[in-house]
Amino acid sequence: MRFTVDRLDHLVLHCADVDITANWYQRVLGMDREEFGENDRTALKFGGQKINLRPVDASVRNWITSDRVVSGCADLCFITAVRPEDVIDHLRNCGIVPVQGPVPKTGALGPMTSVYCRDPDGNLIEIASYLAD
């Protein structure tokens, strides 16, 4: 039987400190924190998706996870409906120095403009907009 994938439901980020990472995503990207399941699991919800936060010592807790558990190795792109200049202003108000941007990029739906920063674990966070100039 052949099948196709419809959408991404959730992804997992390994992090050094779940609370620090969760607070950053709440404060900077406006995500909602959710505690769920056994073993005190934490997720960040936004739109119809979520990010599960898994501590780098998760294998000690008998959680099934990837073969190489490392924090700070992800590159993630989030879409917003605000201008890149407003993203930069918000990041600076949060005490975050943008790494790059605004720069033109190509996303899943075509041309977009992106601003880059890093989360507390060093993951590269791209905040992009499909808004026309």
Image: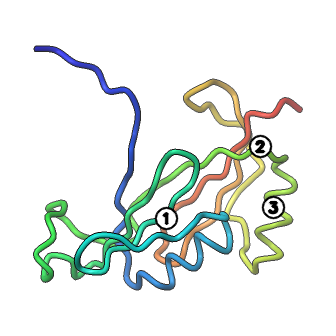
Q: Earlier in the sequence, mark 1 or mark 3?
A: 1
Locate residue 26: give its quadrant.
Answer: bottom right
The reply to whether discs 1 and 2 touch (Cβ–Cβ < 8 Å) is no
Q: What residue sits 23% from the left and 75% below the top?
A: 38
Residue that badge 3 annotates: 88
For label 1, the residue is 44
Secondary structure beneath dot 3 equals: helix
Mark 2, residues whose alpha carbon is within 10 Å: few (<14), some, or many (≥20)? few
Vertical position of residue 6 compared to residue 113: above or below = above
Near-viewer residue (22 or 83): 22
The three-letter amino acid code for the residue at tag 2 is Ala
Amino acid carrying mark 3 in the image: Ile
Please give the name of the residue rendered at 60% of the width and 63% of the height, measured from the top-left corner: 31
Foreground residue among 119 and 80:
80
Which circle's residue, 1 or 2, is located before the other in the chain? 1
Please give the residue where the numbered disc 2 appears in the rendered image: 81
